[in-house]
Structures are given as structure tokens and as C-alpha cells.
Amino acid sequence: MTRAGQSVLSLEGLTKIYPGVRACDDVSLEIAAGEVHALLGENGAGKTTLVKMIYGLVQPDAGRMTLRGAPYAPPEPRAARAAGVAMVFQHFSLFDALAVAENIALGMETSPPPRALAQRIAEVSQLYGLPLDPARTVGTLSAGERQRVEIVRCLLQEPRLLIMDEPTSVLTPQETEILFETLRKLAAEGTSILYISHKLEEIRALCDRATILRRGRVVARPDPRQSTAREMAEAMVGGAFDATARARRDTGEVALEARGLSLPAPGDFGTALRDVSFALRQGEVLGIGGVAGNGQEELLAALSGERRAPRGAVFLQGRDVGALGPAQRRALGLASAPEERLGHAAVPEMSLTRNALLTAAATRGLAPRGMIDWGAARRFAEEVIARFDVRTPGPEVAARALSGGNLQKFVIGRELLQTPVALVVNQPTWGVDAAAAATIRQALMDMAARGAAVIVISQDLDELMEISDRFGALNAGRLSAVHPVGELDRERIGLMMGGAHDMEVAHVAQ
Amino acid sequence: MIALEKRPQPSRGWTAGAPVIAVALTMLAGGALFAALGADPLEAIRVIFWDPLFHPQFAAYSRPQLLVKAGPLILIAIGLAIGFRAGVWNIGAEGQYIIGAICGAGAALAFYPSASPLIFPLAVLAGAAGGFAWGMIPALLRVRFGTNEILVSLMLVYVAEAVLASASSGLLKNPEGMGFPGSRNLAQWEATANPELVAGTGMHWGVVAAFAAVIAAQVLMARHILGFQIQLMGAAPRAARFSGVNAARITLVSLGLAGALAGMAGLFEVTGPAGQITIDFGSGYGFTAIIVAFLGRLNPIGILAAGLLMALTYIGGELAQLMLGLPAAAIQLFQGMLLFFLLAADVFANYRIRIGRREVG
Amino acid sequence: MDLGAIQPAVFTAAIIVSATPILLAAIGELVAERSGVLNLGVEGMMITGAVMGFAVAVTSGNPALGFLAAAAAGAGLSLAFGVLTQFFLANHVATGLALTLAGLGLSALIGKPFEGMKAPPTPRLDLGPLSEIPYLGRALFAHDPIVYLSLAIVAAVWVFLRLTRGGLVLRAVGESAEAAHALGYKVVRVRLLAILFGGACAGLGGAYLSLVRVPQWTEGMTAGAGWIALAIVVFASWRAGRILIGAYLFGGVSVLQLNLQAAGADVPVALLSASPYLVTILVLVLISARGTHGAPAALGRIFHASN
């Protein structure tokens, strides 16, 4: 709604070229005062590069920016902040070991003395409904609270333009609603907001205008209030794509079971698992939702065997596997794929052949009597590449050279080709392009249809609703009761994620 | 503007070429250094790198020295490299080398003056065991308590030196040595002598062991699953744990192996070239081997070449001392510079340089 | 054996003298490590400082110039480390080792002509009536200026890290270089400055060894002091105040063992001379068994701003 106010930021022909890619190609857009402007696009569409240029982290190769009528070319974030541009990052901008107030001070040009700062933090958080304790160590905060720190840090500078990068990926639906209230209030006061997301329903609910990027170019400028989510999705992806096909599945015996699984937190800032129980049958997909940092990684580690579980807590086909390590569990048919691809699921510097050997050495007999059969390992990697459409020149390419989607296809494919009894995956489509994400979801469902038990841990609720038979949510290391997906609505899910269990047993919190 | 840009994959050419470039740069910088010390740089380089092998007068003496010096360097570096590959930073090989020599010599001397042919093998085993035990101290402390193995292994070098001082003037002192500190001469006692096996080559049992270690390590690292696990742990510890690698076991194996090899190197040295346990037995091989390991790309075959090169600088350094009056320390600095240049050249294996930041407007 | 010969005041003064080199090196390394840089080259920088300080002091006859030269030499050597790790993205551990090896060689080379010479005496700071106080005066107020300088540096580092914005930025860089970069802080510049400070302190510490504590130049005279300084940083859980405790504790052990040796105690000499290293290992084990809290999260990690 351009008529809402005069232009705050205008971009003309902004271009940024990295070797081999035009990350941003002739991008123009205009943001008015008090406007909430959505920036949409798939991973790698150029959204992040564009906002990095606005925030001074990257300098454009061509094009002009104008901020409130004056030429604007911030050489560094400091200059952007001084000009009234603030940014809430998706990752990497808080310091775990430092206090809330220190984190906030670091984001300000000149920070007032500690006492005055604490006072201002209190004022701002009161005003916008973002309660915070300035003395708390950030590492001990929940994901939602951490985001509050970032937002308060921005608001203290009274920005004219606030950039938000995927802010709701760490929030429950209820928390998202609260965030939207804050943002609407800010917009009403005249602050412009550039809102980056790929969640289309949110954009329809919040934004005034939208710009869609694909491969670095502006491909559409829909009115989010008038367009359907499907129209916008097709503009983002560049064509219609098939929804996953759901084969009818018969469930069989219990394949994977957790009985009151509790584990202390690993390290200073991890989450303890508390009394996690579920029973998963063959052919079933269990979706586990929850806000990031509520025990997802820890649950995967406890199931994969990276952390040993107490006796009597984890069972595979009725056998207690809690004391076994990852290799032994894998040999019995319990496969897993952690969230972090580079450095956890795969070794970035090593070739795909070596990465295939990483988990398949025993199950595929690639190292008989300890001597590696490199030919067999290579053939296995080639098989994964062929079967799961991994785009790569060949199996001798280093894992880090693959795009997120292709590497993820390789990782999931590597586990699936070992024909596991049960598979646990965390964030299988995080940072993956839409086509690869669809392939991965389909592969997981096909696997279940062939009788495997699958656990999908994800923060993408739409994904979980699409592929799961039953759903549970993690909150502070506890798993809610598990319900069939058909019985749930968004509100109910939000309550589960927020920790309100329907079986109201009083928790004896430790 | 010059910027570094990460390569999608490590460049093989640079990985192999970096040591060559580092050697060339070291020669240049070393030449400048020698010029500053008042020597003709070209002559100094020739004396260090050429004369030990081809000088009409000295080569006959110095050529065999090549294997004599390279043997312990290679043997120690092989063990170190396996640990470095796993991210286990054992920098106390010097201590393991000293303790190995003391234990081996001690075990043998207990049977003096027997002439049993079993004594030498026993001494080798005792040397390996001594080095192994010394290496297990930092390994166990790291596994059990998470103690930093870099600092512990290094501290143990100084402890080993204290033990050496005590042993050479106490427990192992030659009773017929007229009061001088130092043990009996093991090279002159037939039961323990580790002589030159082929005249004029410098080849002794330690060199044989070094070659065997190169082959065994090559098989381990290139073909065996344990070698793969060692590399996994160093490259990505989380992925290694995910794969099922037992980090404690790898730590114990790599430190124990490095200790045993260093201990053996010490034993071969004390029964051969050095001859006896003396207070200055520790000659810095354990530290120079760190350079050898890196220069050899932590790769067994590479270490073989790097060990020979480093041995050459030792002998060349001695020659330069003799012929040009260059101080011995210059060679030590020379070796340190080599590692510096190597680390600098290494960046190009993983990054490429981009000059200028805009290509098209 | 006659322990009665040990006078408390002299003993305390000796501890302070013995601790000062390590205190200086450790506080410098602490700053570097808080910025996320693990410089294992302390030993090399110390010994280079020792030889440069000695050489300049002997040549000029002025110990103050010697200390300045030592700080400059330590910083100069650390710059090589900084360039390699910050611009060439070299592994911190390997580069630190290279620095130590090169420093040992460099110092031996420079020091050759100075072996056996005597250093010009470093005058003690005249604190007037303070040094007249019985016992305390001799123990605490009769030292050279470097002792007080080292204490002032510890206090300044404490204040800097705790209370200033610069200190906050430094800690932030050491916690997460990526986050600090995203906020627009110059990670490489901050780290280079921290490395240089660490180098200068190590150089000073080395010169204190060769000019005051020994005072003479001998090859390899640091004998692991740089490594012990590294251990003390771990012992101190990366806190400036505790560095003081660690260094004086260590100073106490070394003075005690020397005194015991001199007094002809009924303990093997090997054990006594190894005791500082054994105590260091013991302390490291105790600290790590408790769980090493306080290590900067980005310690030793290579940072490369990808764009």
C-alpha cells in the first residue's frame, strides 16, 4: 500500500555476482513507511544476499539504493544501523555465553551504562510485550526468548526499517501470533518491515505487499491479501509441482519404542530428555514437532546411539538397544539422519564414496575383515546417487561441493538403501529446495509403505501434517502424548508445542 | 582487493605442491638469512642440499648419515601423523623417545654381560613398551578426564629429561665409567649392538623399522577401516561419533602407537648411533618429527620423503657449520621456517585467491 | 637438610620473581584466547623475547630498552602467527608449534654471541618507606618495576574484559566469530590485536627471565615456561584474576623445589626438578576432571567471512 506513506527504502537494479552465480540480478523494490513488505523465495533465490546488501554485510556489484530520499550504500552494518536499518537474524547473531544485556549492547552503536541499558530494556520489552531478564545468560534461553533478545536489540535503536529473516521458524503458532501483534504495532507507528519468509499463510496474514525472487530475479509482485498461497508458491518454484502421493499403508508390529527415556543435558546449553515414550509400528510415520532447541537433537542422538540410553528405555523390535552404539544399532536396522548435514551426517571434506562408507560399512559389507573394499564403496555411492537423483559429477566429489538439497538426498538415500527397520530423521528438508524436498518426503513415505517405521522430527508443521500418521510435540525435552494427525487442528498443535499436555499429570520438575 | 574464496573441493595439485613451494620459499628466505650471517647464500644452499650427497670429500661420510638421521625422524613422524590425522595432538614424542631408550637400555643392561641373542629383541620390545607407557599417560588423562593432551604430552618431555638426567648419572651409570655420567656403551656390546647392516648405507635396524612402519601405516590409513575411522575423527568428530567411531579407543590407539614407535626409535638410537644413555641423549628428533609429519602431508609415503629431506638439512647444517662457520641454530630456524611456509602454502589447497571484487557490472 | 634456612620474606620475594615471567605470558595468552585464538607459540615468543631483551640490554646497557625490544620481538613473532592464522587460515595448533620451533631456533641463533655475558642490573623501584616495612617491605615492596607492571597489566586486563566495550567486543569475537561478523565487528582486526598483545606480553615475560630472574642468556632457557603459561590459562578458566593465583602457585612450587634441592632434601633430584611439570599436569587433570568451564566457544576455530 504505497499510499500508506512515502518511500523509506528503494532499491534499483541491485546486482550481486558470485563466481558462477548471479545471487541477485537487477532487483528493484520499494518499501513505504509503515509497510510490512514480504520477501519470498526458495533457498538460494537470493533473499539472504539481498538483505545482506541492505544491511551492509555485502556490497552490491551494481545498482542503487535510496534510503528516505538520500543515496544509501552502507559499507558495513554499523553504517546501516546508524542510518536506521536494523536486522533480526535467523542464525548466528547471539552469543550464548554472554548475558542478555551484553548481547543487546553489542548490537548498538553506543551502549549506555549498564544500569541505564537495563532500564531501557525493561521499558521496551514492557511496551511491546517482550519480557526479558537482562542478566540472564543467552545460552539458557529458549528459542522464542532468544528471538525477543534480537528484536529488543533492534527496537532500542528505533529503526526506520526492520529486516526480519524467517522469524517464525523458531516459534509456536501462539508465539507467532504474539510476534505479529508486535510487528503490526510497530508498523502502525510508522516503522517499515521487510519480512523474509517462505511460509505463505503467514505472509497473507501479515504483509501489505510482496516481492518474489527466483534465481536472483524478481519474478512476481503479488498482493498477498488477494493471491492464494498456491499462486505464490508456484511463482516461487517456477511451475506447479506434484504433491506427495500417499500410498495406503498397513501398520504392523511395533518396530521402535521408547519407554520413559530420560537423559541429562549434554553440555552447558543442551536440553535434557525427560520421560519420552512412544511406540512406533512398521509402516507408520511419526511426526515430532516442536520449537527448535526443545530436545530434537538430543532425541535423535539417543535413538541413533550417539548417546547411550539407560537400560530399558529404547527398544528395536522388542530388543533393548539402549546400551548399543550407533554402528551396532545400525547393524540391527535402526538408521538415522541428523539435522546438520555438514560435519554430522556427512564429512564436508571427504568424497561421497567415503561418506557412503561412513554409515554403510557394516550393513553393506563394504569392509570385510576390516579391509575396505573401495570398489564396493564407490559402487554403493553410485547407487545412492542414481536412485535418489543426486546431482553431482560423481562419487569422488567432496560432500561440501553439493548443494543442500543434493547432499540431503544423498544422506537420506544412503540410509534408505541400507533397508532399515526403523529410520529417524531430523529436519529432513531444512534448507532444501522445493523439488528436492518433495523427493525426500516421497522417499520417506515410500519407505514406510514398504514396512519401515519412520520418525520425522521437523519444525515445519505443514511437512509433518503432510506425511505423518501420528503427531507428537517436544517441549523442554518432554514428548507430548501422540495423536493421529486427523484428530488435530492448528490450535491443538500449538498447545502441544507450547507444553500444554492434554493428559494433565502434574510434572515433578527437577 | 584480494579475497580468499573457498574451493568446492580441496585441490589435489596444491596439496601435493605445497611442500615443494614451501621448500623453495624456505631456500629463498634461508638464503637471505645466510647472507645476513655473512655467508654466500648460493654456496650455503649448495652446502646444505647438495654437498652432503655429492661432495667429493665429505659425501662418503655424510651420505650414510642420511638414513641414520632419517630413520628416527620417519619412525616418530609416522606415529605422530596418525595421531594428527585423528585430531590427537601428541607433541611429546621427544619424551616418549627418551623413555623408550631408557627402558630398552635398562632392560638390556639388566642382563649384562650376557651375549644371548634374545637381548636385542627384548630391548626393542622394552623400548616400545616404555614409549607406549609414556604416551598412554596423556591418552588416559584425555580419555578419562578430558585433559588437554597437548600440554600434558609436552610437560612429560621435561619430566622425561629429568628422568634421563637421573638415569644417566644414577641407575644406568656405567660402573666402569670412572665416575663419568652415562651408561655402558650399548653399541659396543655385541648383544645390543645395532650396527650398520649394509656397509656405506647407514642402514641399521631402526631404518628397517622405519621403512616397515611406512608400509604398515600406508596400509592402515589407505585400506583399513581403523585408518578410515582415524581420519573421520580428525575431519569431523561429530560425524565420527554418528558413524560409531569410539573416540576414546582412537585416542588410546593413536597415542599408544606414536609412543611405541618413538620409544623404538629411541632404543635403536641408543644401541646404534648414540651408543649410550647420556644426559644429552634427547637431540630434538621428537620435535623435528612434527615438522616431518606436516611436511609429509601426514601421509606415510610423504613422510618418507620429508624425513629424508629433513635429514639432509641436518647433515647439510653440520657441513655448513664446518665449511662456512654457520651456527647450528641457523638450521633449526631453517626447519621452523619450512613449517611456516608450508602452512601458508596450504591455504591454497582449500581456497583460491580472487583479485578484484567485481567482474561484470 | 635445613628448611629453617628458608626465610619467609626472601621466599615470598623469590616466588614473585619466579612467577612474573609466567604471569606475563599467561595474561597475554589469556587475552588472545578470549578472542578465540589458540596460540601455542608462547614458548617461542618468550624465548625470542628473552634473547632480544638480553641482547639489547647488554648492547645498550639499558635494561628498559631491553624490555621494550623484548615486547616488540614477541609481538613481531606473534604477527607471523596472526598472518598465518587470520589471513592464511592455517590451523592454530600447527602454526603455534611452528612458532615455537622457529622461535627456539631464532633465539639460539641470535643468542650465540651473548652466551656467558652478564645482564645490566634492572634497578628496583624505589617505593620509599613502603620497602622499610618489616617483612612485607622485603617481600612485596622491594621489586623491580616489571613486577608491578605485570600486576598492573593483570588488573588492566581484568577491567578491560569486564567493564569496557572493547572487552565486550573481544569476548564476543571469541564466543562466535560469525555472529560478531554479522553485527559488523572486524573479527580479524580484533584477533590480530589480541595476538599482538599476547606476543608482547610473552616477550616481556621472556626478558624478565633473562634480565632479572636468571639473569643470563642460555639456549633454551625458558624450559617450558611458555607451555606452563598455557596451562595456567586453562587453570584460570580464562579469568584474569585467577591467572594471578595460577602463576604465583606455580612460582611457589618452583622456588620451593629449588630451595629443597639447595637444602639437600632427601628427595630425588629428578623428582624435584620435574616437580613444576608434574604439578602442572596434576593441576590440569584436576581442572579438567571438574569440567573445563569458561573456554571461549570459538577457541582455535578458523574464521573465514564467506562473503
Image (cartoon, rainbow, N blue to C red):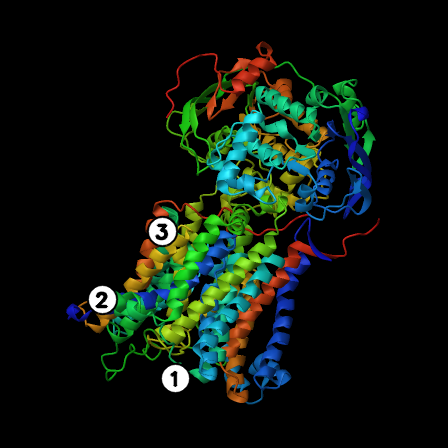
> Does residue A461 appear to the left or right of A479 in the view shown?
right
Residue at 66% in and 58% down: B348
Q: Amino acid at mark 1?
A: Gly
Number of numbered tags placed on the structure image: 3
Give the x, y percent position of residue C14. 29, 68
- Res. C1 image quadrant: bottom left
Give the x, y percent position of residue B253. 42, 52
> Does residue C267 appear to the left or right of B51 in the view shown?
left
Mark on residue B141? 3
Please, what secondary structure does the residue beneath circle 2 have? loop
Q: CA distance from mark 2 to mark 3?
A: 42 Å
Q: CA distance from mark 3 to mark 1?
A: 41 Å
Label 1: chain? C
What residue is pinned by disc 1? C116
Label 3: chain? B
Please, what secondary structure does the residue beneath circle 3 have? helix
Residue at 47% in and 83% down: C59
Specify which label sits upstream in the sequence, 2 or 1: 1
Front position in the image: A143 or A288: A143
- Image quarter in which the N terminus of chain B is found: bottom right
Q: Amino acid at mark 3?
A: Leu
Mark on residue C135? 2
Residue at 60% in and 55% down: C188
Q: Nearer the viewer, mark 3 or mark 1?
A: 1
Give the x, y percent position of residue B191. 32, 74
Most extreme residue toward the top, as rendered? A487
